[in-house]
Image (cartoon, rainbow, N blue to C red):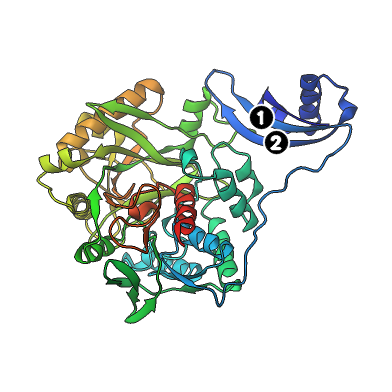
Amino acid sequence: MYTEITLRISPEDAVHEEVLKKEVARSVKVDIDRIKHLEIIRRSVDARQRTVFLNLFVGVWIDRVEEREKVFLPAYKDVFDRPRVIVVGAGPGGLFSALRLIERGYCPVVLERGKCVDKRKGDLGRLYKTGIVDEDSNFGYGEGGAGTFSDGKLFTRSQKRGNVRRILEMLVYFGADKNILIDAHPHIGTDKLPGVIVNIRKAIEAHGGQVYFDTRVTDLLIRDNRIEGVIAGNREFLAKHVILATGHSARDTYKMLHNRNVYMEPKDFAVGFRVEHSQFDIDCMQYHTRTGRGEYLPAAEYNFVTNIAGRGVYSFCMCPGGVVVPAATAPGQQVVNGMSASGRNTPWANSALVTSVGEAELAALNHRGLFAGIEFQEALERKAWEEGGGGLHAPAQALTDFLRGKITRHLPRTSYKPGVTTSPIHAWFPALLAERLQQGITYFGRCARGFVTEQAIVLGVETRTSSPLRIVREKERCVHVGIAGLYPCGEGAGYAGGIVSAAMDGEKCAESVF
């Protein structure tokens, strides 16, 4: 017999199989020798009270082991001579749309402006050594998109957009750890995700799809409001269907689309900075202890959100046991992001702290029109670059000094390898947004004792949380409202906000092709 139960158990007991088995037997009210097999289906940390527990959802086999439904096994076809669909961008939206196209009998032709994973690693190494950004190969562009080298977090609230479990099972099939199917906040890690991405690309090519790197799309081929293909690398790629999955940092693509009369509209986005703490301090804060997390608990996370004057202030992309990295995609910009390896074992924890920005805020800051959001992002990034002294140095300030409006004399330690320069972020960050962030952080500090500390550091700027534009598509299908055969996809089109939601949107776009 097979049954499923929920257990609330101490972290220490959860790692000892015999203790766990004993608790399961007690819960299902059978002798322990009748428990033939256990499988943890779901796992989450419950730290709401002083004593920390794990909540486990457990599959239990009593008396005998029965066959259960298997995880994802692909049904990919040989599509070498099948109708072609162009996919612009090799991020999660583009790659998962390509896989779904193969399942449906179409041949994907993936065009990526950046480089493959191995060459991209070399460019990131040179970025740290020289401080010079390769505009087509960086933390934002290249095989796998921004997520490849910025953490691989898979948590999403986008349950209504598609089958989250399917996406996670596909990632496991291509090499991710099976724990992502169990953990409430699944995470692959920036040391593991590149290999998964390479396996996906190899599967696309093995079944007849094509992947081109160093191939930036510079124009669309449109006739009578129907797509006919794209121009990339001084070459025409012809197809009746184009999935546009460029990512939210491809600002040159937005301008090209505007020139081709592709309908877009402004949307809200968010800006702020990275805040970095000692992971020990975050562990103590979240696990209600003075001695850290101990042997059996994972590096603690946090998630804060509040509303200030009708606008959101919240944490985003929290990286326990992680590092802060440079994420600019062009010279003269200073942008930061965060990432964690699979072990989440550095001494630091970082997160974006951001606030919502819309047309009202942009107008108050003298930015108007379709590209007002992009212009504002660029202005903040240039200012941060100047305040950091040029190169990759990040402007930084102690968190407490940001709240008090004081200049920091001695900066706390940071994981940010290129280095930091003390800067009065409170003074040059737009006052409307800075004050909102200050109020939000003060509130978070009241909610979680230890969050506001002199050892925490603020680094600027975090501007690439989401796209400030939406490429408008039909409600029932993913096709563009004005151009037949064009399918705006993922984060860059304004329809996703992370690896899993972008992957689900990629599948949805592929299913709209016919």
Image quadrant in which you'd find residue 39: top right
Q: Residue at x 32, y 64 (%)?
A: 131
Left or right: residue 333 versus residue 74 is left
Q: Amino acid at mark 2?
A: Ile
Marks 1 and 2, how far apart in space?
7 Å
Q: Which one is in front, 393 or 71? A: 71
Element under label 1? strand
Residue 87 drawn above or below residue 233: above
Residue 364 appears in view: yes
User: Mark 1 is on which residue type?
Assistant: Leu
Q: Which residue is mark 2?
A: 40
Q: Is residue 444 above or below residue 99?
A: above
Confirm or deny contact between disc 1 and disc 2 (CB under 8 A): yes
> Which numbered tag is attached to residue 259?
none
> Which residue is tagged 1?
56
In this image, 389 relative to 419: left or right? Answer: left
Judge from the rendering whether residue 355 lies leftward or rightward of residue 498; answer left or right.
Answer: left
Residue pictured at 49% horizontal, 59% vertical: 97
- Image quadrant holding the N terminus, namely top right
Residue farthest to the bottom, as pictured: 234
Q: Position of residue 31 (x, y in %)?
A: 88, 22
Query: Which residue is located at x 20 percent, y 36 percent?
Result: 433
- x, y percentage for residue 61? 82, 33
Q: Position of residue 176 (x, y in %)?
A: 61, 53
Residue under the point 41% across and 69% down: 112
